Amino acid sequence: MIINEQQLKIISDQLGRTPRGIVRIAASNKNTPLVLQMRSIVDQQPFPTLYWLSSKSLNKAIGQIEGQGWVKYIEARIDDDAELRASLLKDQQRYVDQRWRLMHTDDRAYIEARGFTELFNNYGIGGITEWTKVRCLHMHYAHHLVETNTIGSLLDEAFSLQSLTINY
């Protein structure tokens, strides 16, 4: 899907800069982009983030949730709940597999030629290598909006983010 000029302007406004490395809008709310699918190589550097949350409204809401200590709260739940932990590990592997499936052939060749294959096999959601930890709720929620995941579901249950009015 080609991003049109109007969408590119919205994304630039959301990010506060000219975007780089976008493949497509992966999730939107009417005409507002919410999640961007990214290239794996941006400016000749590895970029293992497949889905980037572009919505200012969601970024702000999730930033407030993180500020309330929810990363540590979720990590404690993961430590205590084997089923939740197993579900998160499945999400991480699906994310890695999806990144490889969607990867541009030029990016794959660059990654393989420069020895970055293991990095892309090991970096999960948010670029984390310890898959039972949470680096960033924004990245999990971006993934959730494209393909439902465990932490995104927890955030929707606790904060009803799916019903948030999106103004950008």
Image (cartoon, grey):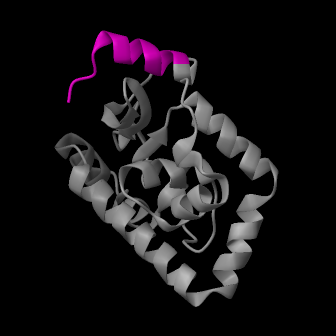
Question: x%, y% of residue 64?
Answer: 75, 43
Asked which quadrant contains residue 69, the reply is bottom right
Question: x%, y% of residue 78?
Answer: 64, 78
- At horizontal 38% and vertical 34% (from top left) the residue drawn is 28
Q: Depth check: give the residue in front, 57 or 53.
A: 57
Q: Which residues are magenta?
A: 1-13
Whether residue 128 is visible, yes or no, is no
Q: Depth check: give the residue in front, 54 or 19.
A: 54
- Asked if the stretch drawn in magenta spans residue 35, the answer is no
- At horizontal 53% and vertical 55% (from top left) the residue drawn is 140
Question: x%, y% of residue 4?
Answer: 27, 15
- At horizontal 36% and vertical 56% (from top left) the residue drawn is 147
- At horizontal 60% and vertical 51% (from top left) the residue drawn is 160
Quadrant into which the C terminus falls? top right
Asked which quadrant contains residue 91, the reply is bottom left
Please state if 51 lies on the left or on the right of 4 as rendered. Answer: right
Please state if 33 lies on the left or on the right of 162 as rendered. Answer: left
Please state if 2 lies on the left or on the right of 32 as rendered. Answer: left
